[in-house]
Amino acid sequence: MDNQSLDPRVKRLKLDADGKLVTIQEGENWNVFEVFHQEKRGAHHEHVGSVHAPSAQLALVFAKEQFGRRKKCVNLWVVRSADILALDVEDEDMFANNADKTYRDASGFKVMEKINKFKGKK
């Protein structure tokens, strides 16, 4: 069975050439890393894209070249995509809030009005 892949990485591995198990050498299997950047100190890191790299150190270099020079950036994070855990969509009910406990929500406090009144502003 001949592999008809157009991917040069697959062609290089010569998959299915002799029917034996394929062993992948270190550096041949690049991972996908998700990239998060921070525009200014104290701001949240935001997801800006992904890079393919053989190691986390090279992923950071690739992320700097790809995403660190496009707009203002003071910090970058790279995380291997396979290491990101998420809950299933069916588990969304665990995030349901109890509507009877609005006292837990701080949005009801009018602090700025009191501060401005104290400062003498209207």
Image (tube, rainbow, N blue to C red):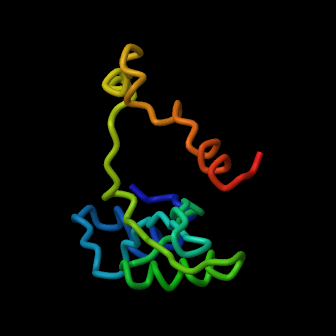
Measured as percent of width and height from the top left, residue 116 is found at 67, 50
Q: Nearer the viewer, residue 56 or 95?
A: 95
Q: Quadrant of the N terminus?
A: bottom left
Residue at the spot 39% in from the left edge and 26% down from the top edge? 103
Point out the image quarter for the C terminus: top right
Give the residue at x 56% y 43%: 111
Residue in front for this viewpoint, 16 or 26: 26
Q: Quadrant of residue 89?
A: top left
Front residue of 9/46: it is 46
Left of 120 or right of it: where is 103?
Answer: left
Q: Is residue 25 left or right of residue 92?
A: left
Q: How many marks?
A: 0
Residue 98 placement: quadrant: top left
User: Taking 47 as reference, is 56 above or below it?
Assistant: below
Q: Which x, y percent locates residue 33?
A: 44, 67
Residue furthest right as drawn: 122
Q: Quadrant of residue 110?
A: top right
Residue at x 31%, y 48% (from the top left corner):
85
- Outermost residue to the top: 100
Query: Which residue lies at the image location 61% right of the left edge and 84% below the top edge?
Result: 65
Q: Is residue 120 above or below residue 14?
A: above
The x and y percentages for residue 38 are 55, 70
The x and y percentages for residue 42 are: 51, 70
Closer to us: 28 or 31: 31
